[in-house]
Image (cartoon, rainbow, N blue to C red):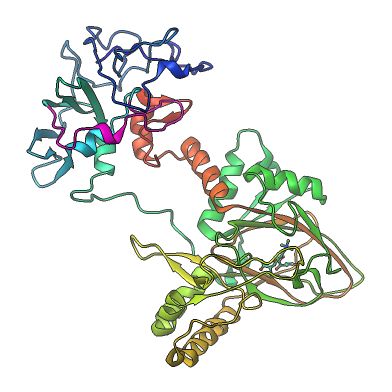
């Protein structure tokens, strides 16, 4: 173990203290520090086991990086019980080879390992940013030694830049690229049709607003799984609805304002501000980065009828289209659709590139459907179609439309004051029936990154990833593991 004389302290009991960090106490980004480090002689019985490196340049007032003791069953200089399933490791010409078992090996390039060192001098423990200068690592850097420790791989780099790095086994396995090894499956998406009306995902306002954020995690987990979730018991005011929206993250301001409270007065240049029916669509298709979530709360509807809310699971409908009409599916996945928002004199939105994006967007890595982007009212001129494709494309979107509007796909609900709904605008389409009378709807957009960030923070707390669980005991700073696979 190493005693760092660097710059961050967790209290001896491992409780987080207020961390003040002086810039001077960290290695500069400009070059790799020539480390001098003293091999700690402490044993794991000491209250704190420290991992890191003494920088040859100590800023004044640096406190020691003190992390919590390694997990039980850890070996130390005095031969405490070590785990028996420690992977093997050896140095090859350009890579370190780790043997997980007799059949499974991973190879990590030396420069890759050095670049991913997460000691406090190479990786800022508070900001989780790289400090080591990647471009000053000798391209042919090669370890002088590797050692398989119970909790991870220890690599000692050449004496010209003396430095010891440590990589937890769980982190190495998760990030194995030669070969890629099994990774946890993505969160299950539950596809639904009209029958979701029997038991739609719902949480209470009280749960969502509770200080411990467990209810907030439940709400966003439902959105992640179903693409939408109701919140019942919301005070029927724009103020309470805005506060509810901000529980997720800051609201995304657009040409329609920040928190919107609208009715059919054409206050903004969009048909949402009329009494017209709106077919199933996703919003802001005309932005390069369409909004992530959309929250709606009907505050009032008097003196008329209609104005029911429509929800359609775009992933569900796409799965049926793929099954029944694969050629049409491929066209929707390949043809770019331009769109615009031009109803406000002060705004004329079109996406970059101007040709827009396909209706169905897929992950490049695994081909999974990741986004539905469809608003036929906001679609611009289809000027990029090959002449031979024109009729085929129109046939494809007719097949798409037919499935979107089928009784099996449509989930109609009459919202009422007190029940808000949040929709994943990258998956679930929404719409409404025409209406008469005075109808007042409020809500907000949340950016997709704000939504995913909040869900990630809540997941760290309530459903941590295996690598986070494995490493947080000894490598957490400000409640975040340095080895979080998201980093
Ligand atoms: C939600 N709010 C009423 C503020 C605006 C609605 C804008 C709808 C627009 N046609 C789109 O699809 O993005
Ligand atoms: O008025 C509604 O219920 C929904 C309007 C709409 O589709 C939108 O604002 O995007």
- Point out residue 149 in the picture as x, y percentages from the top left corner: 18, 25
Instruction: Name the quadrant where ligand 1 sits.
Output: bottom right
**Relative vertical location of residue 426 with respect to residue 220 in this rendering, above or below:** below
Left or right for 448, reference 342:
left
> Residue at horizontal 78%, vertical 77%?
276
Magenta-highlighted residues: 122-143
Left or right for 267, reference 391:
right
**Relative vertical location of residue 138 with respect to residue 345 in this rendering, above or below:** above
> Residue at horizontal 17%, vertical 41%?
109
Count the numbered circles shown: 0
Q: Quadrant of residue 265?
A: bottom right
- Point out residue 471 in the picture as x, y percentages from the top left corner: 34, 30
- Main secondary structure of the magenta stretch: loop
- Point out residue 270 in the picture as x, y percentages from the top left corner: 75, 70
The answer to whether residue 298 is visible is no
The answer to whether residue 27 is visible is yes
- Point out residue 67 in the picture as x, y percentages from the top left corner: 37, 18
Quadrant that contains the N terminus:
top left
- Inspect the magenta stretch and tell me whether residue 478 lies in it: no
Pick the front one: 66 or 76: 66
> Residue at horizontal 14%, vertical 29%?
143
Pick the front one: 260 or 124: 124
Q: Quadrant of residue 145?
A: top left
């Amino acid at each position: 173990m190493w005693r760092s004389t660097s710059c961050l302290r967790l209290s001896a009991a491992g409780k987080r203290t207020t961390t003040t960090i002086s810039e001077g106490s960290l290695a500069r980004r400009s070059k790799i520090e020539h480390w001098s480090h003293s091999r700690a002689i402490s044993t794991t019985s000491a209250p704190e086991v420290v991992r890191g490196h003494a920088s040859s340049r100590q800023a004044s007032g640096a406190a020691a990086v003190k992390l919590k003791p390694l997990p039980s069953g850890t070996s130390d200089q005095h031969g405490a019980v070590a785990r028996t399933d420690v992977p093997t490791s050896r140095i090859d010409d350009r890579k370190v080879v780790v043997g997980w078992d007799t059949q499974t090996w991973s190879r990590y390039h030396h420069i890759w390992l050095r670049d991913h060192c997460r000691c406090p001098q190479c990786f800022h423990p508070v900001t989780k940013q790289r400090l080591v200068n990647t471009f000053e690592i000798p391209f042919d850097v090669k370890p002088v030694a590797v050692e398989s420790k119970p909790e991870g791989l220890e690599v000692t780099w050449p004496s010209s830049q003396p430095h010891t790095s440590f990589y937890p086994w769980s982190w190495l396995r998760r990030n194995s690229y030669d070969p890629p090894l099994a990774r946890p499956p993505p969160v299950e998406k539950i596809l639904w049709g009209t029958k979701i009306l029997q038991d739609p995902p719902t949480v209470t306002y009280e749960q969502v607003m509770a200080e411990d954020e467990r209810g907030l995690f439940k709400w966003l987990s439902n959105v992640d799984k179903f693409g939408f979730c109701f919140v019942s018991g919301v005070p029927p005011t724009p103020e309470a609805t805005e506060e509810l929206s901000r529980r997720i993250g800051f609201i995304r301001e657009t040409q329609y304002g920040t928190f919107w409270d609208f009715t059919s007065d054409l206050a903004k240049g969009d048909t949402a501000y009329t009494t017209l029916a709106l077919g199933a669509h996703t919003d802001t298709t005309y932005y390069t980065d369409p909004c992530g979530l959309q929250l709606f709360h009907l505050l009032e509807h008097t003196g008329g009828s209609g104005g029911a809310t429509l929800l359609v699971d775009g992933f569900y409908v796409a799965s049926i289209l793929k099954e029944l009409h694969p050629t049409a599916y491929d066209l929707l996945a390949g043809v770019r659709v331009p769109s615009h928002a031009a109803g406000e004199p002060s705004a004329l939105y079109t996406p970059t590139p101007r040709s827009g994006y396909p209706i169905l967007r897929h992950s490049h890595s695994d081909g999974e459907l990741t986004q539905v982007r469809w608003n036929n009212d906001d679609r611009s001129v289809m000027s990029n179609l090959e002449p031979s494709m024109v009729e085929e494309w129109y046939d494809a979107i007719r097949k798409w439309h037919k499935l979107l509007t089928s009784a099996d796909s449509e989930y109609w609900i009459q919202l009422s004051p007190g029940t808000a709904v949040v929709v994943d605008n990258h998956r679930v389409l929404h719409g409404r029936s025409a209406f008469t009378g005075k109808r007042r709807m409020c809500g907000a957009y949340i950016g997709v990154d704000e939504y995913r960030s909040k869900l990630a923070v809540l997941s760290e707390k309530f459903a941590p990833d295996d690598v986070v669980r494995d490493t947080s005991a000894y490598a957490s700073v400000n409640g975040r593991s340095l080895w979080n696979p998201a980093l």
